[in-house]
Each structure stands twice: as C-alpha cells, then as structure tokens.
C-alpha cells in the first residue's frame, strides 16, 4: 500500500505495522500509522495534502514549522500558571531532514505526532464540551497573537472572504453544466434562492474591514468541533489541531466557525434537516469559555459584529458547499454526487435557525 511505503520515509523508530485511513476531514487525506520496535510502539498521523486546494504545500509546512515552534514555546513559558498540560502536535521530519515527502505523483505527505489519550468528536457532546471548545479557541488565539504574521505565507488566498465565494458560484452558474445541476432538483433551486436573498448583506464583515472598523489578527481559520481535542481522563480541552489555515483574519471567522459547528448538535453531515437547530445554550457556553481569554483583546467594534459573524460563517459554508456542488464537486472530498448539496442544505437550515434567534443570541452576547 502506498501510504505504508510513505510512512517508512519519516523519522520514526521501528517498523510500520499498519496504516489506516481515518476518513476524517473534507480536504486532506488522513491516516493513522503504527510503528513498533522490539520494546515499544509509536502512533503518528500521516496526511496527504490536497493540492487542488493548497497550491503550494511546501508553504503549508513552512508555516506549520514556525507556528508549532512558537506555540510550543508559549505553552512552556506559561506551563506553571496553567490548570492543565496544553499540547500541540509536532512536525515529524522525514529521514532526509525535510518536513515532507513528495511521492511519484508529486503529492506532498507530512507526518505529525498523535496527541495520545485525547479525542475529538464530530458532534458536540454536552454543554461542558461546548465550553471547552470556546476555551481552547480563545487560548489558541491568545498564544498566536504575538506571532509575526509577516513570516506566514498566505496558503489559501481569499479564505473566508464571503463575496469571493459568491463570485465563484456565479462563475459556475454561467456554465451549461452549472445550469443543468441547478435545475436538476428543487432543493438546488431553493438553495440558490436562499443565497440570492442574502447577496447584499454577505459583504458585512468585509465592508467593516474596509472601513477600518475591524482589524486583522492571526486566527486559526477552521476551529470546528472535530478539530478540538478533549483529554479522555479529564474531559478538558487539550489542543486545537489542523493548522493549515492559520493566517491573519478576523476573529469573527473563528468564533463564527466554532459556533456554527458546535451549536448544531445534529452535525454537518446529517440527512435529517429537522434535527438541525442552532442551540443557544451551547452558544452561551462556547462564548463564555472563549471570553476567558478573548475579553482582553476584543474591541467594541469586534463585539458589535459578533452576531453577523455567527450568521455569516454558517451561511458562507453553505455557499461554499453549494458552489462546489454546482461546479461538479472539485474542492471538498465527497462520497456521492449530492453530498455537497446536502451539506449546503444543513448550513442554510442552521443559518435560518440563527436568524430566527437573532434577538436571543444578541442578548446572550451582550451579557458576556
Ligand atoms: C474543510 O478539511 P477540513 O475538514 O478540516 C474546510 C473548512 C470547512 C470544513 C467544513 C481548507 O475543513 O473551511 O469549514 O471543511 N477547509 C478548507 O467541515 O477549505
Ligand atoms: Mg481544515
């Protein structure tokens, strides 16, 4: 098997026993590799970076090296004042000293350490779990706040710039294949109408940025619930994984993404739309956890746009899934043709639920 041969090229003691595809993530391919020596075992994470999405995988690895070294140093500096042992995976170099292996097809592979005795979950488990997700995100944002952004490459231009996704959708809709896919089902047509009704509003954060009201700072970019690791022994958050999209952005992208993911107990992949709701109790718990760190760095303008950020990032992900469906599923990994359409419908149902609870959400945010 190819992944097993690649695994052997990384600098890990022992021989490869198995390499299992985990199926986690919508972009990269992730495997768990087990190595054994005569007296021990090591488990690592092996990933093939999706070159359709990340045009320069070597930039991703340069960022990851800088970022992990920065965060490890910051964690150690604060270790004695901390209520837990914070962790973050480390890049495992290849035997030739590089931070990746390129295979015969030109694909880039990387290896990182596995955070043991901890798990992440596809769906939120409880109010306590939600609180930890918010706490982990705020903690991470604080640790990277003093990083020199100018050293980081922009690995994914236009990421979270909602009006750009709208343009991509419009381009896909101009093609005859796009039109065929749009009119193939009532559901696709409904999604398109849902988007049309929000075209003007969807530049809300970009406009505020343009006016100088909101400022960029280093953010995670993808803090969904399945990227938050929870310690098996204590139930407390121990780290946030998936560092491919760390770059300067608005904190609203992060808190919006964390909330759209954690406050929908049905999860992103459900086929039962009736189960999709934005749970405001979970929202309060996440924001409470987040504020423990974020209170010190959020400006009044940041606070003013929190509700819009929550509504926007749910909407934006629906738009991204839908645009990809119309374009023929070229970005997100899919197992069947309508998967991106179904994913879009989930996010639009969630957006609808957020809009219906606007007053309640705004009131909850003001209290914090
Ligand atoms: C993608 O690859 P993964 O599953 O970590 C996507 C995120 C979406 C997420 C939705 C680089 O993340 O932006 O929010 O799917 N990542 C990229 O599950 O586009
Ligand atoms: Mg990701």
Image (cartoon, rainbow, N blue to C red):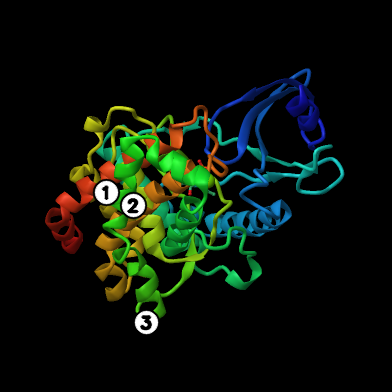
Q: Earlier in the sequence, mark 3 or mark 2?
A: 3
Q: Which mark is residue 315?
A: 2
Please provide percent x and percent y for residue 317. 40, 49
Marker count (numbered): 3
Q: Secondary structure at mark 1?
A: helix
Q: Looking at the image, which residue is at 55% across and 28% down?
A: 23
- Which residue is situated farthest in the front direction here? 176
In the rendered structure, find residue 333 and report the number of the disc placed on it.
none
Is residue 228 visible to us here?
Answer: no
Quarter of the image for the N terminus: give it: top right
Q: Is mark 2 within 8 Å of ligand 1?
A: no
Which residue occupies the extreme right position in the image? 96
Q: Which quadrant does the C terminus fall into? A: bottom left
The relative height of residue 190 versus residue 65 in the rendered view (above or below) is above
Gap in Å between the C-alphas at discs 3 and 2? 22 Å
- Check disc 3: other Cα within 10 Å, few if <14, some if 14-19, many if 20+: few
The secondary element bearing badge 3 is classed as loop
Q: Which residue is mark 1?
A: 351
Which of labels 3 and 2 is toward the front?
A: 2
Describe the element under mark 2 as helix, strand or loop: helix
Q: Disc 1 beta carbon < 8 A from ligand 1?
A: no
Residue 264 placement, left or right of 325? left
């Amino acid at each position: 098997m190819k992944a097993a041969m690649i695994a052997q090229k990384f600098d890990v003691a022992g021989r490869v026993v198995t390499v299992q595809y985990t199926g986690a993530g919508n972009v990269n391919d992730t495997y768990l590799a087990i190595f054994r020596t005569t007296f021990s075992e090591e488990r690592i994470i092996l990933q093939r970076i999706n070159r359709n999405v990340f045009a320069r995988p070597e930039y991703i690895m340069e960022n990851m090296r800088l970022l992990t070294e920065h965060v490890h140093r910051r964690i150690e500096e604060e270790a004695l004042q901390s209520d837990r042992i914070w962790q973050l995976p480390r890049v495992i170099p290849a035997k030739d000293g590089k931070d990746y292996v390129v295979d015969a097809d030109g694909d880039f592979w990387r290896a990182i350490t596995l955070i043991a005795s901890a798990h992440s979950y596809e769906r939120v488990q409880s109010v306590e779990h939600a609180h930890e997700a918010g706490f982990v995100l705020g903690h991470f944002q604080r640790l990277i706040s003093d990083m020199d952004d100018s050293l980081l490459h922009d690995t994914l231009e236009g990421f979270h710039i909602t009006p750009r996704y709208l343009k991509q959708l419009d381009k896909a809709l101009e093609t005859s294949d796009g039109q065929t896919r749009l009119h193939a089902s009532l559901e696709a047509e409904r999604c398109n109408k849902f988007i049309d009704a929000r075209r003007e509003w969807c530049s809300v954060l970009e406009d505020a940025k343009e006016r100088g009201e909101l400022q960029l700072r280093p953010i995670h970019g993808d803090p969904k619930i399945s990227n938050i690791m929870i310690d098996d022994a204590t139930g407390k958050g121990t780290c946030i994984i998936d560092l491919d999209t760390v770059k300067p952005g608005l904190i609203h992208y992060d808190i919006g993404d964390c909330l759209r993911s954690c406050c929908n107990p049905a999860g992103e992949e459900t086929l039962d739309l009736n189960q999709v709701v934005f749970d405001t109790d979970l929202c309060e718990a996440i924001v409470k956890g987040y504020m423990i760190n974020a209170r010190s760095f959020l400006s009044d303008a940041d606070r003013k746009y929190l509700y819009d950020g929550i509504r926007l990032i749910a909407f934006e992900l629906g738009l991204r899934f839908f645009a990809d469906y119309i374009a023929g599923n070229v970005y997100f990994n899919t197992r069947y043709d309508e998967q991106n359409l179904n994913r879009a419908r989930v996010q639009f149902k969630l957006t609808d639920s957020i809009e219906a609870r606007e007053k309640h959400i705004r009131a909850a945010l003001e209290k914090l």
